[in-house]
Every structure is written in C-alpha cells, then in structure tokens.
Amino acid sequence: MDPNKKVLLVDDDSVYIFILTRLLRKHSPLVEVVSAKEGTEALAMLKRDAEMGALPQVIITDIEMPGMNGLDFIKELAKLGLVDYRHTKVILNSGKASYSNLNWPAEVPSVAFFPKPLTLETLAGIVGYV
Amino acid sequence: MGNSPGNTYKLDKLTELNEELENYFSNTIIPQLFVDGDMILRKFTPAAMTHFKLSDSDVGRHIDEVSNNIRFPTIIENIHEVIGSNKSLEKEIQTTDNVWYQMNILPYIVRRENRSNGVIITFIDINDRIQILKGYERLNRNHEVVIHALYHDIKGPMSNIEALVNIMDEAMGEGGNSEAEAKEVMEMLKLSVAKLRETVEDLVDIGEAEMDFANATERVNFGNVIEDAILSLKDKITESEAKITSEIREAEIGIPRKTIRSIIYNLLGNAIKYRSPERLPEVLIRTERANDTVVLTVRDNGMGILEDKKEAIFARYTRLRDDVEGSGIGLFIVKNMVEDTGGRIEVESTVGEGSTFRVYFRQNPTQK
C-alpha cells in the first residue's frame, strides 16, 4: 500500500478501532487511519475529504451501530456518489456472519463482507491491493 | 291425532327424542346460543348462562338486547353474515373484558327448504391457549435478545480482549513498548471486561425473570425489592456517594418478584451510572396507585437525555456515551419486561438537570 494512503474505520466500538488501527500500522506504518462512530459522522467526514480531494482508499464499516447503521451508510454513500468505487474499497465488517448472505439492492455497488474480528492477514489482503 | 295406538307410540317416541335433546343440551359444558332468523334468542346452554350472565328470562329477547352480555361488538354483523351466506363462520375473538374465545357461527338449516332460519353460535374458551402462545412469543423474543447479545455484546468484547491480550504479550516480549501504551491497553481491557460482565448480568436477569413466570400471581412487597436492589448496587452507591430516597405509597404489586427487582435494579443502576459530573447523585424511587395502574417512578438529578435520544435509549444497540460502561441492552430488557406484564415505560428528561422514568403497571385494585 502506498504510504500516504488513508483508511476510514466506522465503528461504535472504540476498542475495536484501536485494535484495527494498530494492525493497520503494523502492516504499513505510514498509513493514515481516521475513524467515525456511526454513519452520519462518517458521511460528514467523507464530504470534507471529497472537497479536499483526500478521500480514503479503504472504508471498513461495522453494521449495527447507534445512529446511522452500516447498511444505511453504504446506501447513502452510493446515493450521494461521494466515492469512486474504482479507487475506494468498501468493506462491511460485523460479528454476525449471516450478513454475508445479504441481498444487495440494485443501487448499491458490490461491497465485500468480512466477519469480525479482522485478522492481520485479512487486513493486509484488503489494503494490499488498493 | 286421536287415540290410535300408532299415534300414542309416535307421541311417546317424540317425547323421548325431545327428552334426549334437552338432556344433551342442558349437559353441554360449552356456551352455545340458538338465534332464529328474526334475531330472537331461542335457547342457550347452561354454560352460556355463566359465561354471558344470561338468565331464563332472556329467552325470547332480541339479540340486540343481550349483545352487551356477550361483550363482542361485531356479533350481530357476524350473525347476519352467516344467515345471508348460509356458510359457517369461525374466528378467534376477544371480548371487551379480554377473554379469548373461538367463536363458531353455524347456519340453522331448515332441510326441506334448504335455507337458514337462524344460527347456532358456539364459544370455546381458548384463553389458556392464547396465554401459552403469548408465553412462547415472549420466550422467542427473549431468545432473540440472547442470540443478538451473543453476537453483539459478548463475541465483540471477547475478541477485543483476545486481541488486547496479544498486544500486551507482544509489548512484553519486545520490551520496546512504552509504559504509557501498556496502560492504555490495560484500560481498554478493563472496559471490555466490564462490558462483558454487564451483558452477562443483564442476560442472567432475563433467565431469572423467565423462570419466575410460574409465580406470576405472587404479591411482591415494594419495600423489600427496593432494599434488595440498593443492596446489590451498594458498591456503586457508596463510591458515587449517591443519596437514595424511597417513597412507598403503594406497598405491593402482583408482578413476579425477579421481574420487578430487575426493573428497579436497572433503573437505579442507570440513575447512578449516568450521574452528573457536577453534583452528587440523588435518586428518588416512588410507588403509587392511580386507579387501575400502579406507577413506579425513578427520578434522578443526573446528566439527562437529549430529546431526540429518548426513543433510542430503549432500542437494542444504543450506547449513548462511549465513556460510560454499558452494554446498551439493559433498558431494552426493562422495556420488554414491562410490556410483557401489559404495562408501559416512559421517560421525561432535561439535559443537565436529570431524568424521570415512570413505569405504569396495569393492576386492578381487587386483583390478587
């Protein structure tokens, strides 16, 4: 991964964010990691990023969060057309593996699902090829 | 008719048949009504007399006049429907005083003319069946809560703890990590363990209340239960220097002990947990009666709840403040427990001043 790349983590669990941030730094020490507690906060951050031309290359979002949940967040993200999916990878991440069988509505482009917790290997796979 | 032996025999036979039918009818334990084509109540079983408070003098009256006794608003409509269509009707009904019946309205057919000349209405008491069904629904809902908590509130903190322990392990192995980082990781470990513990305690509450289902009719003394909850929260009360006052204006309630204890424990626990940083916590617990309702009030002087979060606090995934330990399922469980008893819970709050939770239990004064 390019050292000046950016990852956005969306999760209400601050401990999980701490752990992922650590794993990401381990994989590529110079990566920029930013985080939001739920969908609305993440969208606000992405709007600012879009204006400044500093959008993240990876977005990893939890599904069940207070406020805007992960599914609504990615739907809203698609509707607003904030990110170019060729340059930004969107990952859904939840402890409930049954979410991998979700039927996606047509307006949401393909998003990958990975069960929680993400391991260093999986994370390396996700950010490695961006 | 005359006195010919044949006629006497027919008359005897008829009397005998009539006797059999009368006996059969008067020994029917199911409430049944015969209503003719002019909507006149012609006959009913003794069971109908007890279930619908009918007396012999009601025979021959128009169904309109006794429909209040039957306590089911659309019964007249339903009778017309069956007479008109000549087809029987079956439905589950709940009377205005909340008793469930399966009601069957069958057309009374005059065979020679193949038309209905009235109806026979049968009521089967299905209250027990409905209660069991409701019990299963509750069980199912609790099962969902447990399964959800397993994913969201147990698996999450567990794998966090695992990862944090690994980080600690690495830090100690390398010897290169700063003490500050070790401290940070340790704090997070504590937070995760506390969260896990709280979730498990909440879930144990569900289990206990469920097992207490059988004792649904016991009378519980509010004073004892409040005392019990205060005792369980003793450490937190001492640590926060909270002042707890109780005003018991209604002494007892007919709700399972563990349910009421769990409700008070959760509300009191929250009142202390979400205390204001600016003052010592003061909590008032009050019980009182208003007609057929027993109201439990828990009022605090804590941080308060934002107007737009008042609904959310009762939802499953909510944890409003990240810096306060909590699984976010406590109030969800409380709400479920209250609604299972037929009651409701409300909250009133001003940010910076405090919150008041009110639980309304439906309790008839005569109910034992």
Image (cartoon, coloured by chain):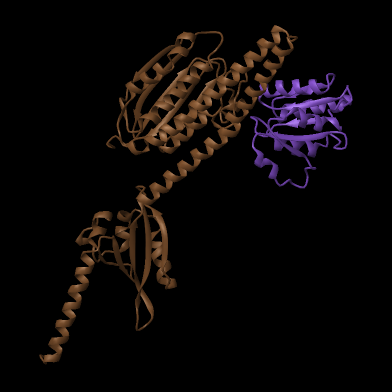
Chain colours: A purple, B brown
Which residue is more in the foreground, B163 or B65? Answer: B163
Can residue B323 be seen? no
Which residue is more in the foreground, A101 or A40? Answer: A101
Which residue is more in the foreground, B82 or B259? Answer: B259
Using the image, determine if residue B363 lies above or below residue B119: above
Q: Quadrant of residue B352?
A: top right
- Number of numbered labels in the structure image: 0
Q: Quadrant of the C terminus of chain B?
A: top left
Can residue B81 be seen? yes
- Indicate the position of residue B75 as horizontal and vertical percent values: 38, 60
Using the image, determine if residue B309 lies above or below residue B137: above
Which residue is more in the foreground, B85 or B27? Answer: B27
Q: Quadrant of residue A129?
A: top right
- Indicate the position of residue B155 as horizontal and vertical percent values: 60, 30
- Residue sitting at the far front: B173
Q: Quadrant of the N terminus of chain B?
A: bottom left
- Indicate the position of residue A29 as horizontal and vertical percent values: 83, 19
- At x 85%, y 37%, the residue is A85
- Indicate the position of residue B315 as horizontal and vertical percent values: 56, 32
Question: Horizontal placement of B13 versus B307: left or right?
Answer: left
Question: Horizontal placement of B313 versus B183: left or right?
Answer: left
Question: Horizontal placement of B146 versus A62: left or right?
Answer: left
- At x 71%, y 20%, the residue is A18
